Amino acid sequence: MQRQAAETLALQALGWIAAQEGLLDAFLHMTGATPEDVRRDAGKPAFLIGVLDFLMAEDARVMSFCDEAGLDYEAPMRARAALPGGAPTHWT
């Protein structure tokens, strides 16, 4: 996946999160972000990685988002890897 497509998918995920009742509040609580942070940083790769990490923290979220967006369930993971700093960390 190319970076621009990854950013688009992450922004789409942010919009989906915001549209789900209570999920934006959960995102803000989990990440420590404020609504102003969301407005200011929504286009930054590090913030978008956080959006995708939040989405991928629960399988049900991934499945619901991907089903609604017409994406395969691995698309958020591929998008995360395509963003600068988003490559998986190998601890071994």
Image (tube, rainbow, N blue to C red):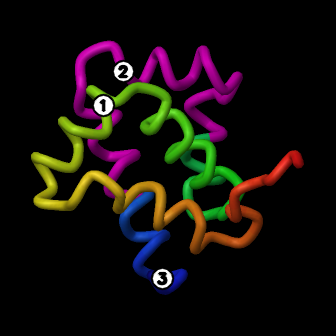
CB-based contact (under 8 Å), mark 1 and mark 2: yes
Q: Amino acid at mark 1?
A: Arg
Q: Residue furthest right?
A: 92
At 32% across and 56% down in the image, what residue appears?
A: 12
| Label 3 – label 1 distance at C-alpha | 23 Å
Q: Where is 22 relative to 79, above or below?
A: above
* Magenta span contains residue 73: no
Q: Of tags 3 and 1, which is closer to the observer?
A: 1
Sequence-first tag of 1 and 2: 2
At 32% across and 46% down in the image, what residue appears?
A: 15
Q: Which residues are magenta?
A: 11-37
Disc 1 crowd rating (10 Å Cα; few below 14, some 14-19, many 20+) is some
Left or right? Give the position of 45 relative to 70.
right
Q: Where is 10 relative to 64, above or below?
A: below
Quadrant of the rendered image containing residue 61: top left
Determine which residue is flagged by label 1: 61
Q: Amino acid at mark 3?
A: Gln
- Give x and y (percent) for residue 64: 18, 36
Q: Amino acid at mark 2?
A: Leu
Quadrant of the rendered image containing residue 87: bottom right
Determine which residue is flagged by label 3: 4
- Give x and y (percent) for residue 57: 49, 29
Determine which residue is flagged by label 2: 23
Q: Secondary structure at mark 3?
A: helix
